[in-house]
Image (cartoon, rainbow, N blue to C red):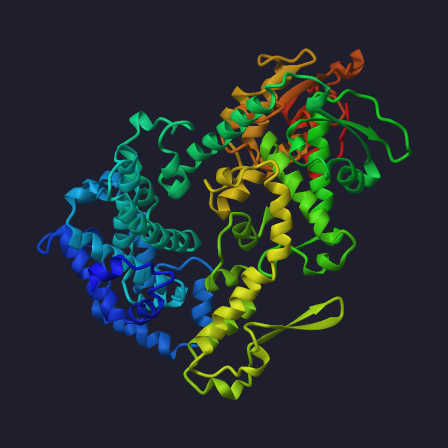
Amino acid sequence: MLRIFSLLNPLIGSMPILNALSFNPEFIVKLWVSLENSIFGANNPSISQIKPSISTNSQNKQNKGLKDAKWANVFQKRKGKIEETGTSSGTVNADVASNNEKDEFEIWDVKMLRKEHKNISKELLYTLHLFCACYGHLLLVLDDIEFYEKQAPFTLAQQRTISNVLNTFVYNSLMQSKSNSSNSNNNNNKALMEVLVRCLHLQHERDLRHQFCPAALWLAPARKDRKDSAPVGVGNNNREVLMSVPHVYPFEERVKIFREFIKQDKISNQLGGPGPSNTVEIVIRRDKIIEDGMRQLNSIGPRLKSSIHVSFVSECGLPEAGLDYGGLSKEFLTDLAKAAFNPEFGLFTQTSTSDVNLLPNLSARVLPNGLETIEFLGRIVGKALYEGILLEISFSLVFVQKLLGRYSFLDELSSLDSELYRNLMHLKHFEGDVSELCLDFTVTEELNGRMIVHELRPGGKNVQVVNENKLQYVHAMADFKLNRQIAPFANAFYRGLSDLISPSWLSLFNANEFNQLLSGGKQDFDITDLKNNTKYSGGYSESSRTVKLFWEVIKSFSPNERCMLLKFVTSCSRAPLLGFKYLNPSFTIHKVTCELPLWATIGGQDVDRLPSASTCYNTLKLPTYKRSSTLRSKLLYSISSNTGFELS
């Protein structure tokens, strides 16, 4: 049967078989035990046994507790990080946290899976194919409560081993396929790899949502193939690995690869030589920044990759003085994004579970040029990514999943609509008669005061939800909210984004990483890195007295105050992902000379002027303070009240 199944396409011809096998936990567990014995040996401990597992008594108590506990308590656990307890939830954090005494990467290196396919028994390959086809199918409907709390059909220790085996096998297979391109078995291997990669992605995405594997597990396979942790070259034969399993390379390394892709694209676009054809001139009224930007830029498509020269017109209708050397175009992009993504503008709204993450407003489709404007905003975000300009925005992970071409599943609904997620989970595990709830396969949506009924399946208004089809209803409802409802907005945004950023470049990242790529690194930053990459102008140097006072004061700031300073100067509170070396224009401290009368100097009086900033040039204009106490108080006042902004 294994040999026959390996020749079937599990997505078409074998679906009935797949459904029958996938929902038979005992069969999947037996398959895994067989694989584990083949890989690690019947008498040798597997990786899952390196860490403490859950005792039978503990598991039984946990399952009983879950049965008796109220659903609210269960969902409260799932909402945040699982706290360390004596049950499996404690095992998650305890297991992920340790291994300091061993080489983490050595622990997760499965040497047996480094063999070429021809040196691995066909029986093992067939079993692996069948297991991944069945378990990958089951993972589509396995919710987080079953996965983390009930730990069915596998414990978290076993899940780590499964992830490790798949991760190692897929990586090594892709690396070996480069040198065996003429191998006659490539077609058979391709079918196997498609199933394995799909199952691996489902495991990895689950880990991203709630960690059950240490980071070293995902990075371990590629570790030995890189000398001195050297970055992966863009043009070498690792491209297939990058496109299929990018997570085997550190995030910072993939950001460098992303920037290298863009660098090469810029070079290819400039082959025609510099000139007017490579520059876009626009005139922007400050009080009409969205309308003017869209009117002049939305129709040029990929030509937006060219340099933008911006001339601003003040709210009084007067042209503003100043030449655009890159700073004004940065200001234009950041100001436009700030205005357009503001929930008050109406195109985007905050999710019900977050006051930070943005999601397209469903009402945008009935607004004049709503979808067209969202497409334009996709181009603006693409331009910011293309130029390495940070924007102070963060999107809902569900929305980003669509931009990355990925499907969203039931448990991701918790980050979008926690109340609906709780209700669907309660329905899924409801042990009574579901027909008493009088549900059908429809969902009602309110749009501008009108109630619109959508069918979740053809003829859904005539199909009652009963115990036999409640699982279909739960997943159909989640699919509507996570995929169907958001699709028109995501497609419009994607059309604009892909004019500048190739989808293959974006495939290097997951949804969380996309937001980091767009808005920068962690809260707070490395002061030494900023200091080493700061420029001085107007007469200041690194040895200037006021400059030395400035760095002393910054060190005494809290992380939040340092982020406020960074936003005051650069318009974004986060540092560039690869450090301030990549901030463009460079962080600059400009001298503002303030002369005091002799009597004031003798009396100990200090400069009274406030610091100011030119965010378009990432420049802090710092008066010549004599005392650190004055510099600290004046700087805190400016960054807290956002006063002192100037345009040079």
Q: Quadrant of residue 69?
A: bottom left
Along the line of sight, the residue nearer the viewer: 553 or 458: 458
Image quarter of the N terminus: bottom left
**Residue 216, placed above or below residue 428:** above
User: Residue at horizontal 74%, vertical 15%?
Assistant: 593
Q: Is residue 320 visible?
A: yes
Q: x and y percent of residue 209 in the render?
A: 44, 54
Q: Residue furthest left?
A: 43
Residue at image point 21% right, 56% down: 126
Horizontal and vertical percent position of residue 244: 39, 43
Residue at the spot 27% in from the left edge and 47% down from the top edge: 189
Q: Could you tell me how many numbered marks the image carries? A: 0
Query: Considering only vertical position in the picture, is 226 above or below 396?
Result: above
Identify whether 357 is placed above or below 77.
above
Could you say which quadrant of the image residue 346 lies in?
bottom right
* Residue 639 percent location from the top left of the image: 68, 35
Left or right, residue 329 beside residue 530: right
Where is residue 157, by image quadrant? bottom left
Q: Nearer the viewer, residue 8 or 353?
A: 8
Which image quarter is the C terminus in?
A: top right
